[in-house]
Image (cartoon, rainbow, N blue to C red):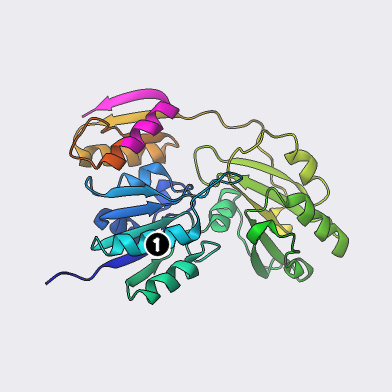
Amino acid sequence: MSVKAKVYLVGAGPGNPLYLTRKAERCIQQADVILYDQLVHPFILQLSDPKAEWIHVGKTPYTKYIKQDRINALLVEKASQHQTVVRLKGGDPAIFGRVVEEVETLKAHGIDFEIVPGITAASAAVSQLGRGLTERNVSTNITFTTGHFKENEENDIDITTLEHNGTLAIYMGIKRLPIIMNQIKTHIQKDFPVVVIFNASRHDQFIISGTVHTIIDQLSQLPERIGPGITIVGDVARDIRSDASLPLVPNVVLLKGPRAQCLSRAYELYEEGKVAYLDYRDDEHYHRTQREKITELIHQSTIQAIEQF
């Protein structure tokens, strides 16, 4: 008797592998196939079984990408072929992760599923500031909003939280931030503090602080596409310093040898703020998609050291 397939819609967190939940880790380890987004840290994928298939279904901003309908179809297809399918998303899948479309597809096909929450970008970002999203006598409420709308519609966002001593967290809003800041200036007189955190919690994190009136000029001086950014508006963002210089290209440590030892050492390196990958490019025990991905990553990286166990 065959075991019924199950799809796990898993939040991979903000990017730092150390912020992955234990439940997410277990799902990844048990997966037969993983459909992963662009913002999922590659090392997190390496927690999977060597035989697991990896399928990139990421959506890179301002480029052509795989459509949601195709992702839905892949979930159904892989669930018909495998026992455990993981749909791995950056952050929390239920916060601007389009999880509802995928849940509806799975329900329509009678496929069992479970949503596994992850640490969302706003929580990770504010933790790097040494602040909270709420603060007694400063911010008593918070609104999560997206700055990017379907088919690039130019809609206003809900800024009423700022009128009631609250915090505004804007996801996917860097491109439209001039419009959003102008909306705030038009409707509210206060020049709120603003912080933009790129690549929150990762080795290449970068922070720009300012106010509603100044932040756009500050961002205009940066190179394009330094990574995904989340914007925090409100008094909890006060007295935050911008980083003095852009982060350098990371020096990657490659780990070779017994898998358990390599994984343990990798976690130590991530605790030190470094980047590490298991190097199994030539190991036929690993699925072809895994070997192709790690080969691509290594070719794109500056290798600092190779540690052999």
Q: Nearer the viewer, residue 41 or 60?
A: 60
Q: Quadrant of residue 117?
A: bottom left
The question of residue 308 being in magenta is answered with yes
Looking at the rendered image, the quarter that the C terminus falls into is: top left
Q: Amino acid at mark 1?
A: Ala
Q: Nearer the viewer, residue 186 or 151?
A: 151
Q: Nearer the viewer, residue 16 or 62?
A: 62
Residue drawn at x 67%, y 55% as measured from the top left:
232
List the residue tagged with mark 1: 73
Residue drawn at x 59%, y 51% as measured from the top left:
130
Residue drawn at x 69%, y 53% as measured from the top left:
237
Left or right: 220 in relation to 185: left
Left or right: 14 in relation to 77: right
The range drawn in magenta is 292-309
Compared with 277, 112 (above or below) is below
Residue drawn at x 64%, y 42% as measured from the top left:
207
Compared with 191, 188 (above or below) is below
Looking at the rendered image, the quarter that the N terminus falls into is: bottom left
Compared with 97, 262 (above or below) is above
Question: Tag 1, which secondary structure?
Answer: helix
Q: Is residue 21 visible?
A: no
Residue 206 image position (x, y, % from top left): 61, 40
Residue 26 image position (x, y, % from top left): 28, 58
Q: Quadrant of residue 243?
A: top right
